[in-house]
Image: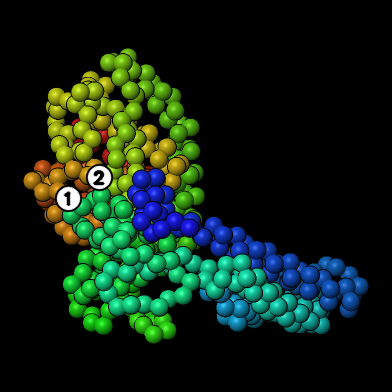
């Protein structure tokens, strides 16, 4: 097994996460529970009906099953806790089963179709389903515990000079040994911290009191469930309290979107990106040809930008500037009549065609169709770096960056000559994160069509 410093170097040099993601494995387990519930209900009703009536119509099960799943999906029936605590899992399943059965009886009573049902089959199937579901939850949780241990989540404890914490079955790193710091003035430091936090379901920091405000801000910006061990509240703005055996911590951040919301957003991203690429591919090929014919240089410009969790990623654009004028840091914003842009570049920037290759970033999972626009590291508002203008700046990175966003459809784009240009965008970005909805994303995509050509796009 590697020493901590070796692992730290591996993360820094190769860009690998500290821990593998468990989310897909949990989703597969939820799907297994879902399929088991369906099979057990159909099997239970089929068995009772066959033994009592010597037939296999299973009308009761066919009507009950969609109601059960509708209720179960809106309750924590398929949740992380249900993979760890079989009693909780069984209670939630039985609750959903009783509610769905009650609702079915109510509906069929008013529809005057109760005569279609056999009371023996309905009640016998219901009790047998409940019994089988309880047994299945117990066996499943025991098998999960045997394979995964007591935790089905990635939990990280960062020891940063605070109280000593005893937290079994938890990944632990020493902040000093691994060189991770919540330095809001150093994007490289935040990127490094972000790689440790990647794939983590819960992060607890035990640090000196003087550092707790900085750790709190860094965890909020990373978009993870973050907690700070403390014996004083002070200025951390906690949103909850977590209690473990022998210690307590303040919850200072949570990820902005739950699993279901992230899944919906990802499906939306893929559908829109694939559709847009199919429609725009002729235009993109013509643009690539025009760039190549003008000066023979590369078609794409790849720039390192800050993405979700304050981690760096490579963003792709059509190259719009001369080869000798590439600005990797983005320290100088493009101005109207900028002498660095090519003839083709001026046109594709004015029409936003230069942004189309970011659809490949969306497919790769480093960007979203809608989200806060990613900024270059050296971007400035007036004479200040973006994060020097407002300390909430890092919070905009709790979601994936977008090809378009709420700020853009409101007209906040182009050069940031004044600090207000940045604060206007930041306010829109934080509003988008706080109020995310799938319909909101769809509306922003539609509104983007109307602002593709914009007076501040140059």
Q: Is residue 311 visible?
A: yes
Count the labels in the image: 2
Which of the two residues, 203 or 434, is positioned nearer the viewer here? Answer: 203
The part of the image, by quadrant, that contains residue 201 is bottom left
Residue 303 percent coordinates (x, y): 29, 37
Q: Earlier in the sequence, mark 1 or mark 2?
A: 2
Which of the two residues, 143 or 386, is positioned nearer the viewer here? Answer: 143
Where, quadrant-wise, is the C terminus in this rendering?
Answer: top left
Q: Residues within 10 Å of mark 2 (few under 14, many from 20)?
A: some
Give the residue furthest to the bottom: 246
- The answer to whether residue 321 is above or below residue 126 is above
Which of the two residues, 182 or 160, is positioned nearer the viewer here? Answer: 160
Which of the two residues, 236 or 363, is positioned nearer the viewer here? Answer: 236
Residue 320 percent coordinates (x, y): 26, 27
Give the residue furthest to the right: 54
Q: Are marks 1 and 2 in contact (CB under 8 Å)?
A: yes
Secondary structure of residue under mark 1: helix
Residue annotated with mark 1 = 386
Question: Which residue occupies 79% across, 73% down?
Answer: 45
Tag of residue 375: 2
Q: Is residue 329 left or right of residue 38?
A: left
Tag of residue 292: none
Question: Which residue occupies 68% across, 74% down?
Answer: 139
Q: Is residue 333 left or right of residue 242?
A: left
Question: Which residue occupies 12% across, 51% down?
Answer: 420
Residue 14 percent coordinates (x, y): 39, 45
What colouring does the structure picture have?
Answer: rainbow
Q: Is residue 254 left or right of residue 142?
A: left
Question: Which residue occupies 25% across, 56% down?
Answer: 394
Residue 114 percent coordinates (x, y): 75, 78
- The answer to whether residue 381 is above or below residue 4 is above
């Amino acid at each position: 097994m590697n020493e901590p410093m070796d692992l730290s170097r591996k993360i820094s040099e190769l860009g690998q996460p500290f821990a593998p993601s468990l989310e897909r494995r949990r989703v597969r387990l939820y799907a297994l529970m879902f399929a088991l519930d369906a099979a057990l209900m159909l099997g239970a009703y089929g068995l009772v009906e066959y033994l009592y009536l010597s037939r296999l119509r299973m009308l009761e099960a066919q009507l009950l099953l969609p109601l059960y799943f509708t209720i179960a999906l809106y309750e924590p029936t398929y949740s992380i806790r249900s993979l760890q605590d079989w009693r909780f899992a069984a209670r939630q399943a039985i609750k959903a089963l009783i509610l769905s059965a009650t609702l079915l009886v109510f509906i069929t009573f008013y529809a005057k179709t109760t005569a279609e049902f056999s009371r023996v089959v309905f009640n016998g199937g219901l009790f047998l389903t409940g019994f089988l579901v309880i047994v299945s939850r117990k066996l499943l949780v025991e098998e999960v515990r045997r394979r995964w241990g007591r935790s089905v989540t990635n939990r990280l404890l960062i020891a940063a000079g605070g109280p000593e914490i005893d937290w079994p079955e938890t990944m632990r790193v020493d902040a000093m040994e691994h060189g991770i710091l919540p330095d809001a003035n150093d994007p490289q430091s935040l990127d490094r911290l972000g790689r440790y936090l990647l794939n983590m379901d819960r992060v607890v920091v035990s640090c000196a009191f003087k550092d707790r405000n900085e750790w709190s801000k860094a965890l909020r910006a990373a978009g993870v469930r973050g907690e700070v061990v403390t014996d004083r509240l002070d200025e951390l703005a906690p949103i909850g309290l977590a209690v473990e055996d022998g210690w307590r911590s303040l919850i200072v951040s949570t990820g902005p979107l739950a699993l279901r919301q992230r899944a919906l957003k990802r499906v939306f991203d893929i559908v829109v990106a694939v559709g847009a690429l199919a429609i725009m591919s002729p235009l993109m090929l013509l643009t690539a040809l025009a760039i190549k014919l003008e000066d023979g240089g590369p078609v794409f410009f790849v720039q390192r930008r800050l993405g979700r969790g304050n981690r760096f990623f490579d963003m792709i654009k059509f190259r719009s500037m001369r080869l000798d004028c590439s600005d990797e840091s983005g320290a100088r914003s493009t101005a109207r009549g900028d002498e660095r842009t090519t003839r083709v570049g001026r046109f594709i920037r004015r029409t936003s065609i230069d942004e189309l290759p970011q659809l490949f970033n969306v497919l790769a999972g480093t960007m979203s169709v809608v989200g806060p626009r990613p900024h270059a590291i050296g971007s400035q508002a007036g004479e200040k770096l973006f994060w020097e203008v407002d300390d909430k700046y890092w919070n905009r990175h709790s979601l994936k960056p977008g090809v378009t966003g709420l700020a853009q459809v409101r007209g906040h784009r182009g050069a940031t000559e004044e600090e207000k240009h940045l604060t206007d965008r930041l306010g829109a970005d934080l509003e988008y994160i706080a109020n995310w909805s799938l319909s909101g994303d769809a509306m922003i995509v539609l509104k983007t069509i109307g602002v593709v050509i914009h007076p501040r796009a140059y």
